[in-house]
Image (cartoon, rainbow, N blue to C red):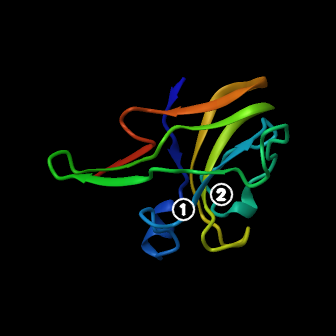
Amino acid sequence: MSISATLYGGVLESLANKEIDLGSDTLNVMLLTSSYVPSDTHRYLSDLTGEAVGTGYTSGGKTLTGVTVTYNTGTKTLTVDADDISWSSSTLTARYAAIVDVTPGSASTNPLISYVDFGADVSDTNGTFQINWNAAGIATVSHA
């Protein structure tokens, strides 16, 4: 499944306040269960609930690799992308994935960037839980 992420409402403010440096900070993908209810007002890791638990998954999620940030002057679009991410030999169920900047170091200061709604619970049993980001990027921001 190829997916795109929805930006949290506070991400632009976090970028403006230099809480997030997409080019150099450590960004983790955390898997969340259906007990989590996404909200545009969620701002920090402490707002997340219902982290997935299971074999092959470590609390706090997994670090994104190959993160790129590019700006296209022709389309006036900023694109954030990264390598697809997977948890091998895992047994777990998740409904959401959240991207969190973990560089600041605490739940109350680690800003949320975006989340993915899989549309339903997705499970695997002793398999590979994989997220394939949209070919156009994880997230894009355009301006006039």
Of residues 141 and 52, which is closer to you in this image? 52
Position above or below: 141 against 92: below
Residue 10: mark in rendering = 1
Residue underneath mark 2: 42
Q: In the rendered view, does 63 fall on the left or right side of 59?
A: left
Query: Within the image, what quadrant is residue 115 found in?
Result: top right
Q: Residue at x 79, y 52 (%)?
A: 59
Report the label total.
2
Answer with left or right where residue 136 lies relative to residue 2. Answer: left
Give residue 44's position: percent from left, percent from top. Answer: 66, 64
Q: x and y percent of residue 10 in the render?
A: 54, 62
Q: 111 or 41: nearer the eye?
A: 111
Q: Is residue 141 left or right of residue 124?
A: left
Residue 92 seen in this snapshot: no
Residue 109 sits in quarter: bottom right
Mark 1 secondary-structure assignment: loop
- Label 2, label 1: how far apart the Cα atoms are: 7 Å
Which numbered disc, 2 or 1, marks the residue that appears first in the sequence? 1
**Up-down relation of residue 77 to residue 128 (above or below):** below
Q: Are marks 2 and 1 in contact (CB under 8 Å)?
A: yes
Residue 14 seen anywhere in this rendered image of the structure: yes
